[in-house]
Image (spheres, coloured by chain):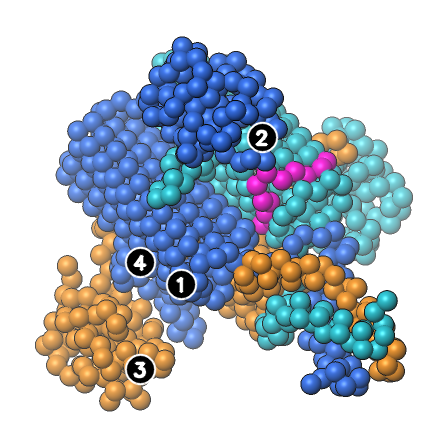
Chain colours: A cyan, B orange, C blue
Amino acid sequence: MKSYSLGDIAGQLNLQLIGDPDCPIKGLGTLASAGAGEISFLSNSSYLGQLASTSASAVIVEARHADAAPTSVLIAEHPYVAFAHLSQLFAELPSVEAGVHASASVAASASLGEGVCIGANAVIEDDVEIGANSAIGPGTVVGRGVRLGENCRLHAQVTLYHGVQIGSRVTVHSQAVIGADGFGFAFDGTRRVKIQQLGSVQIGDDVDIGAGTTIDRGAIEDTIVEHGVKIDNQVQIGHNCYIGAHTVICGCTAIAGSARIGKYCILGGASGMVGHLSLADGVQVSAMSLVNKSITEPGTYSSGTGQMKTADWKRAIVRFQQLEGIVRRLKELEKLVGADD
Amino acid sequence: MKSYSLGDIAGQLNLQLIGDPDCPIKGLGTLASAGAGEISFLSNSSYLGQLASTSASAVIVEARHADAAPTSVLIAEHPYVAFAHLSQLFAELPSVEAGVHASASVAASASLGEGVCIGANAVIEDDVEIGANSAIGPGTVVGRGVRLGENCRLHAQVTLYHGVQIGSRVTVHSQAVIGADGFGFAFDGTRRVKIQQLGSVQIGDDVDIGAGTTIDRGAIEDTIVEHGVKIDNQVQIGHNCYIGAHTVICGCTAIAGSARIGKYCILGGASGMVGHLSLADGVQVSAMSLVNKSITEPGTYSSGTGQMKTADWKRAIVRFQQLEGIVRRLKELEKLVGADD
Amino acid sequence: MKSYSLGDIAGQLNLQLIGDPDCPIKGLGTLASAGAGEISFLSNSSYLGQLASTSASAVIVEARHADAAPTSVLIAEHPYVAFAHLSQLFAELPSVEAGVHASASVAASASLGEGVCIGANAVIEDDVEIGANSAIGPGTVVGRGVRLGENCRLHAQVTLYHGVQIGSRVTVHSQAVIGADGFGFAFDGTRRVKIQQLGSVQIGDDVDIGAGTTIDRGAIEDTIVEHGVKIDNQVQIGHNCYIGAHTVICGCTAIAGSARIGKYCILGGASGMVGHLSLADGVQVSAMSLVNKSITEPGTYSSGTGQMKTADWKRAIVRFQQLEGIVRRLKELEKLVGADD
């Protein structure tokens, strides 16, 4: 159980403290749930009411809200970012110890940097290079010729296919698969002929990849994920996609092959994107929306109908399917009453 | 190959038998496909025609349908529930033998209850506690400090992250991941700062979790799945969700973080739910529908348009996107003909 | 690095060559990206402009486009199919060596054909039969009694549950799960009673299965995937589905139980299909569309609304939800102006 004095936290996060520097802080909490010895934050003014009644021992707030807090206060320009940094002080990830577990299978030709940890039953194939201080989880399989940078963390049971290249400070969660074959077949009139996927996958630095996510290798050229991209669980990225730097892809999103996504985009959960389309920088796509045309301007885009009671919805979709006829009737009427000019 | 006399089955299921108690039953079948030596059931009156012509040796029916059956009959209040119990008599799951496979890697500090089975190449990390008669499949990884109850079954290649807590009689299918990091980053204007996920996951008793499903650990507090919840394959449950008891979540459903779902809900396949929303008890969501507002009353809810021939659909979506203009034209007309009051 | 003379390639693919047979070819490229020593193809006339300016050393084209190419030419009836065959000449998959890795766990009762390769930490349970020249990747688990044909490739960390039957020349990518329990419970008014899934899964010859895909075992009878079916990543196929020969299922598609899909269908990415429905042969479903009624005629089918700017979309969905009222107002108007006959 980690504990810090409030003054110590202020120092580490480089924030101004108003209150008791000796106050011990043992954990984090929401404004509503935090108690004595815990620290919280306010990043959204709509929670000002909760700030007033919080039982936290300290809160991180913008300067303009300092007076509203009934507790010790740390002043931050961006309280949510400060809270993110703070969360790292309290992380209690199981430590990983450098060294190769006796049950792991590591090829003689593999090259392991200093401080590398290889977990139980992991498999490291020929000609793999793993940078310093990277940790490979139990059961993870790293295919032939993979290059992995420094300070990476592959959790348990990740699969990296042969030849995949990954930068530094990359986290990959369990059951993610990077570098499986892209989905390419040529139909000869009777059956589908496999198109060998001769490209690979390149992942930049500071990328996070969620559990169960799949990123396919390219058909001819590589699939590319740029620096700082954050990918949630169960996302599918098809072959030859290009994902621009610092883009965020929420869970269960499906991106078909050869999509080209700009920088600083946000794809909402379970959204989709048809193949060979492109998104400009700064595009946001709403949850469960399908991108079926390229988007050239930043902004938010959506599809779908919004939820309804099923009985009402059943009537609405009948009407949706009649829309062409409804517009025809409207035109007829406009003509009849002379409103069609 | 298991076999029972019909009388034996009646006894075990506590059902009234009309017919031959000595009739041997070797398997189950649908009304349409079952043959001699097989037993079927009728739970939906629309299959009464199939009942009349079934070749099964016995059928489970409600009392009111007993006369309609051409075979021996077991009378049940709920034939489908009786059939479910019956299916358990015929299950031929490979037996699992207590003991630790020689190739498994079990930490010295792990505590295994009586009758526990640890499969080949499984990894049990420090301070894990596994209750009596639980079986851990081949290649499964159980992270540091996990607590698992009695009579659980983790199939092959499941991943439980550190600190996850699971009740008794829980089944988890292959490639499911419980306790990976929730998806939380604070944007500092240039890059995304990781918010450490300091919570864990709590799973109740009698929960089933499907293959490839992911349930993320909480940011501050825990993600919670209550007793009796049934989760199908490839479902994503974000951090800090609360899933009420006996709720059913069908395959490929995506639930964003901090969703709060009531008891006895049913989320249809590939449905979705935006974060921070809540569902009352007893809500049902249709397949591939998105919940984008909280739902406070039980009932069924849907979104989407229903399928059409693509050529017709292309016209309909043009009209959909013109709906605002269509309504404006309608208002104009109403004004023109004096129908706008 | 593989290399062939152009004449050698023409001979192996049985194509007419116009140009220099001694020209060395070291790789493949797109028309736009290929350089000296690389070969490309034209399968879509809209890229004729790129053909004219390509720097490739050779291109595969239809006879009618031979004159338009500035390079050596291979004439093919179907250039894309020829390119698929060509890609196989250049594939550099890591070779797999026959034999059982020392760390694999293979039951004494398992039967391995000639040339079989069992990777590191793989688990082969009792009574498994594996046909000649099949390769089992590292960490893959093959359950009791599985039958696998010849020349199959299971990549790393695949899970096959007990009793699954798979034909020859089948490829399964990492983290795919075949034969997990179908999702079946009978509600007894309080809780869900498990229906044991007594069927299995049958996969035909020449099937490809993508990473993270799940195919459930049947409740009573088997789930069936016919010859030549191609399944992309993260697809879910429910219990008792029947997938007709040579059908293609794109990534993230969710198919509920007991669906019956014809031959030569194409299900677009992230599409869905409600249970117990059927598709005729030759049906195509668009990306992210839901099949909610059976389809009896070949053709393309779609659902959804198409993307819009979110601000416009918010107005459109309000109108969508008012469609019943809009049509009522239209009828009123028609009555008022005498257009309702």
| C82 with respect to C335 (left or right) | left
Which residue matches tag 1?
A: C278
SS class of the residue under badge 2?
Answer: helix
Label whose residue precedes the other's in the sequence (2 or 4): 2
In the image, which is nearer the foreground, mark 1 or mark 3? 1
**Residue wearing tag 3:** B48
Disc 2 is attached to a residue of which chain? C
Q: In 3D space, how far apart are the residues under numbered discs 1 and 3 (Cα atoms)?
A: 22 Å
Query: Circle 4: is it few (<14), some (14-19), or many (20+) Cα within 10 Å?
Result: many
Residue contact at pointers 2 and 4, CB within 8 angstroms: no
Structural distance between the alpha carbons of marks 2 and 4: 49 Å
Q: Which secondary structure, mark 3? A: helix
Q: Give the range drawn in magenta.
A: A270-281
| Real-space Cα separation, disc 3 to disc 2, in angstroms | 62 Å
Number of the label disc, if any, that sits on residue C48 = 2
Determine the chain carrying the residue at label 4: C
Residue A88 position in % (x across, y down): 65, 33
Q: Which kind of residue does numbered mark 1 sit on? A: Ser
> Where does the image place residue C273, in percent across and percent down from the top left?
47, 59
Can you give x and y, in whole percent of width and height, for residue A105 in the image?
34, 23
Earlier-in-chain disc, 1 versus 2:
2
> Which residue is pictured at 42% across the width and 54% down the height?
C282
Q: Mark 1 lies on which chain?
A: C
